[in-house]
Amino acid sequence: VGMGSEYLEISDLTVDFDGFKAVSGVNMTLLQGDLRFLIGPNGAGKTTLVDAITGLVSATGSVQKSGVELIGKRAHKIARLGVGRTFQTASVFENLTVLQNLDIAAGAQRSALALLRTRRGVEAKIDEALDIIGLGGLRDKPAGVLAHGQKQWLEIGMLLVQNSTVLLLDEPVAGMSHEEREETGNLLRRIGGERTVVVVEHDMDFMRQFATSVTVLHGGKVLSEGTVAEVQADPKVQQVYLGT
Ligand code: ADP
């Protein structure tokens, strides 16, 4: 596995809902280490694009992860290929501890690898995830007592122990305090490196601070793409986001 090999190559991706193209001919290249923000007004097609990548809606075109085609594969198979996502409402098991939540997430992968993986390997992976999400001190607390932000971080940890190398996060800082936003941005930077993170986000300040690249969707199509500065300077983007 060479440098830059963990990436997504999206070509001519289209989602057609009975003749309405919610995503229309999208091309995007996500490199290893990218912290890509996906922005655009309501109805731009952001959620549908993420749904198409993760196999929740059927699509045409191509999404390749390190050369493996994802389109046509089922959601659980795509997850097993290392493409993980979170939703706006964190789905953690409230009655189980932080550790148990991570253990279950790690176990979701275990059947296929059962004979190859030692318990110790799972524990090392969980420890690494706890470090990244900063919840080591809360490992034995029930997830139900965690603050809103901490639950979101636990969900990201659950993707990490599933060996997700492409993480798609739906508005990860919605409802968070200023401090939690900062923490989340730093967490996303820690995740980066050998992984790729795609963040669907409405919070422009958060984007400006943490994005390494931005894709603007509008009407199901890519309106603009580049660095934060490039996208902000694009007159087409200014037209869509009047006053920002
Ligand atoms: P965003 O996440 O950018 O707000 P969405 O991907 O949710 O946008 O929606 C894009 C467009 O597709 C919207 O016009 C929405 O009404 C439409 N849409 C989303 N899901 C469906 C569906 N299951 N059937 C028909 N139209 C849909």
Image (cartoon, grey):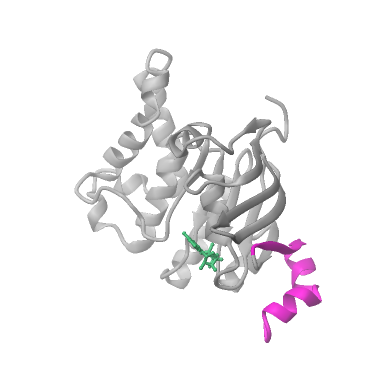
* Image-based side of 218 in relation to 128, left or right: right
The residue range painted magenta reads 220-244
Q: Spot the residue most to the bottom.
A: 243
* Image-based side of 123 in relation to 227, left or right: left
User: Would you say residue 228 sits in the magenta stretch?
Assistant: yes
Q: How many marks?
A: 0
User: Would you say residue 234 sits in the magenta stretch?
Assistant: yes
14 and 91: which is toward the camera? 14
Find residue 136 and report its horizontal and vertical position in percent: 36, 44
Q: Is residue 182 visible?
A: yes
123 and 224: which is toward the camera? 224
Q: Spot the residue most to the front.
A: 19
Question: Which residue corresponds to the image point at 58% horizontal and 68% vertical from the top-left?
Answer: 206
Looking at the rendering, in which quadrant would you find the N terminus? top right
Question: Which residue corresponds to the image point at 31% horizontal and 49% vertical from the top-left?
Answer: 92
Up-down: is 14 above or below 126? below
Q: Is residue 185 visible?
A: no
8 and 57: which is toward the camera? 57
Question: Which residue corresponds to the image point at 47% horizontal and 32% vertical from the top-left?
Answer: 77
Find residue 114 and report its horizontal and vertical position in percent: 37, 17
Q: Spot the residue most to the left.
A: 95
Residue 127 picture quarter: top left
Up-down: is 108 above or below 112? below
* Image-based side of 3 in relation to 180, left or right: right
Looking at the rendering, in which quadrant would you find the C terminus? bottom right
Find residue 20 and report its horizontal and vertical position in percent: 58, 62
Residue 119 picture quarter: top left
Find residue 176 and report its horizontal and vertical position in percent: 42, 68
Residue 9 picture quarter: top right
